[in-house]
Image: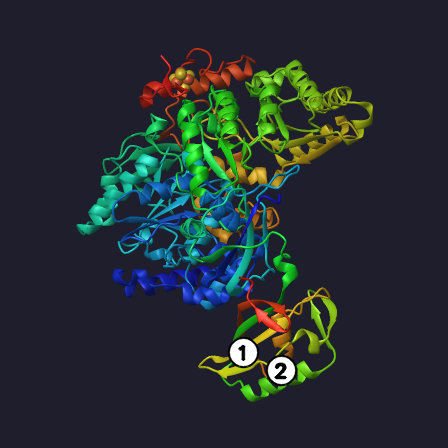
Amino acid sequence: MFLSRHAEAILKAIVRVAENNRSSKKTDLWPQIRPLLYRVERPSRYIDSEWGVAEAQDYRVGLCYPDTYEVGQANQALALLYQAANSLDGVSGERIFLPWIDLSDLMRKEDIELFTLESFMPVSRVDILGITIPYELSYTSILEVLSLAHIPFRAKYRDDSYPLVIGGGPCVFNPEPLADFFDAFLIGEGEEAWKEIISTDKTMRAQGKTKQEILEKLVGISGVYVPSFYDVSYREDGRISTITPTHGAPDRVYKRVVTDMETVAPIQCPIVPYVDVVHNRYTLEILRGCTRGCRFCQAGMTYRPVRERSADSIVKNAIDGLRDSGYDEISLTSLSSADHSQLEEVVRRLQKQFEGSGVSVSLPSLRVDAFSIDMAHLMAQGGRKTGLTFAPEAGSQRLRDVINKNVTEEQLLETVERAFKAGWRRIKLYFMIGLPTETDEDIAAIGELAGKVLRTAKKSVEPGQRGGITVGVSVSTLVPKSHTPFQWEPQATDEEIHRKQRVLRDFMPRKGVNLSWHDADISFLEGVIARGDRRLSPVLEAAWRNGARFDAWSEQFSLKRWLDAFEECAYNPAFTAHRARDYDEVFPWAHLSTGVSDAYLVAEAKKAREEVLTQDCSFDSCTGCGACQTLDVDIVLGGEKRQ
Amino acid sequence: MSSDFRLRINYRKADRGAFLSHLEVLHTVERIVRRAQLPYAITQGFHPHMKVAFGPALSVGTASDGEYLDLWLSEFVRPDIALAKLKASAPRVLPIERVGYIGNKLPSLTAAITIHAYRAEIWARDIEIDKVEQSFQSVRKSTSLEVVQKDKKKVFNPALCIPKDAVVTKNEEGCTIDFSLRIDQTGALRPEILLQEVCNRAGQTYSHLELVRTGLFIEEDGVWVRPM
Ligand code: SF4
């Protein structure tokens, strides 16, 4: 049945190409969608007309987030790219989200193509299509988007009548499993490059240039990677042999980086959704990057170096953004907002500004390791007392040194004591298992640490209140990611993870701790996709044909579809997930660079084995990762370049 | 606060706005008011929020030609200025139509409004409108009407809750039915449930039904008056 679904989509696409006429692109699908909305859940996610939407212009930029409206509309990167597109003359953004299963199924039944929100035009008729690649488990949803849009999956089967399909977002640092489906990827930060890509495509399309000619031009834009311009060869043992550029593409594509945050506007007049989306508030990015250097963290490597907005700019933008959107909450976001060097000043000024108006200021989560409790107190004055979270990641000091998590047990317990004395009653601790060099003692130490936190918390409050105290412990599995010091590490097998989970349960306090796990099956799949190469594309297609979509929604996820797909395609997932690599292995992403040098990553990998810490270059001196020099960018603190 | 100024606002749930839920309308209106930068009053208490009271809720899928809400301001703003600011801050599917100050002592909108008028568009090309009309009359004349609403059995008294006969007109797709309901403390008969019952009894089926609330009224000595 699913095979025919795909075959049907391709057939329709071919027919459509034959009758293609770009002047008909403005077809309005709303009259066909409207009656379906009486039959689906939460129809308001499909009606457009929110506050802040752009007027349609001649050249339409499709911006797709391959998940539901609630998840996608809350995504800040998409909002920034929408704003960037709309800032260009004669250009407008068209949002595209994946309709929930109820509507998708109705659309398939009634043969209605996937639509954009602003104009309700068929997605296949936009001029250029940008798709965010937010997480590994979204890959089958990307295929579902293409299928619903009647766009052939493989870039090589799409002729010049189709929009260029460009991928961007967190997963593009190893986009290889998706290489066959995209015309190009934008590696790194998009605000500036996205405008250059759009302008190039717009001009060249108007001149009647072909897709191939446009792609050859686009590789000249810093950060653009055209996968079809690279030939990959493999060794007999399955490892990659060489990656060779063609068509004048560079040997290595370096990520695009915004050197001065003040030159890129934050989201100014955001779209204000009707539906209660994931983060329903005005969000303002106060800094980019995080150089704490946790060795498992991909974002820490890919967003280097740290660039802060100045306090003045944050306060001004916050006031404007709240006024223009009408939200009653502002969230100051980043990978690690508590690290902003002027955060206290910012929060004090904002709270003074909004006093008595019912507006509150929040940080995405109060990560106490970078955060004084006085600061937490200050935040709580502006509204609700958010939960405190603490991410020791490992139970023992030894293992925390391995992963470069620069916090000690004393710091944690001291913070817990102060927080509970100050009135907090809940704390959540994040840990990982499956870390390199991990032993059962390290696992047991997680339980012991949770016990110490619980006892400290209880000691810090009046006896009468001790009953209400809970410590949340959330345990995920390490998924080694590309471009990190752990990229050479084998991922723990499911059996190992299940055994470790049992050990952990034995050492956890029986009462007062809420223990939660990440699903080991999901982590396994994430691991295969995160370090997979181009040979994974047929597997993604097969999984989609088997019915996989919305894999990130745990109730929709089925490992069986994937295991069947691996078998159908004779792909050994263990080779990708569970194999240790040599330092000289050619990775699928070897031709893509974050600016951090290979030598630095190897050195970090070795320091992990030696249990040696690396300092944070934002507060200490440069540790030599190479990003600043390679990308010609500086650390910016409080709006000032650090000398 | 007795010093607050109670501004009654008349707005529509227009076009695609029909698909908004009551909660979504509530949140949107609060944002409209904040964007308009009106000096709204804040409730006292642990979670201070905007002091605003809405008229009767509308369900998802139902549009409206006239809804009302009361907003309390802490300072007087000229109504024409308040209206201009609100209009400029509202998305096109929730247009603001009129505003006017009303007395702080007047009962709340939900307490005062008892009559809800609706127009239904029914998709059924071969529908016989005489039969629908007669069926509506007979339902209205009965002394008791048992329906299932939200999986619960409920009994209504049509003589009380259906104040008038319906006006049924034929159109290309099917027919239009204009009717009204009286809502009191004993519960609200849902308009789509009533129409389903009417059509069932008339032996008429339809593929699709769309509702618009055409008016909300306060009953004053037997006369229906609009809330502003
Ligand atoms: S080059 Fe030095 S200062 Fe720049 S991010 Fe790397 S370690 Fe930090």
Q: In the rendering, at what x and y percent does residue B105 appear?
A: 63, 53
Whole-Å distance between the Cαs marked 1 and 2? Answer: 10 Å
Local secondary structure at mark 2: helix
Q: In the rendering, at what x and y percent does residue A458 appear?
A: 77, 23
Determine whether, in the image, residue A159 is placed left or right of residue A78. Answer: left
Disc assigned to residue B177? 1
Outermost residue to the top: A621
Q: Is residue A229 above or below residue A605?
A: below
Instruction: Identify the chain of the residue marked 2, using the numbered disc in the image.
Output: B
Determine whether, in the image, residue A395 is placed left or right of residue A571. Answer: right
Instruction: Identify the chain of the residue marked 1, using the numbered disc in the image.
Output: B
Which image quadrant for residue B113?
bottom right
Proximity of marks 1 and 2: CB atoms separated by less than 8 Å: yes
Kind of residue sitting beneath label 2: Phe
Picture residue at 61% right of the left edge, 24% below the top? A377
**Residue that carries the numbered disc 2 in the rendered image:** B136
Q: In the rendering, at what x and y percent does residue B87 appear?
A: 42, 53
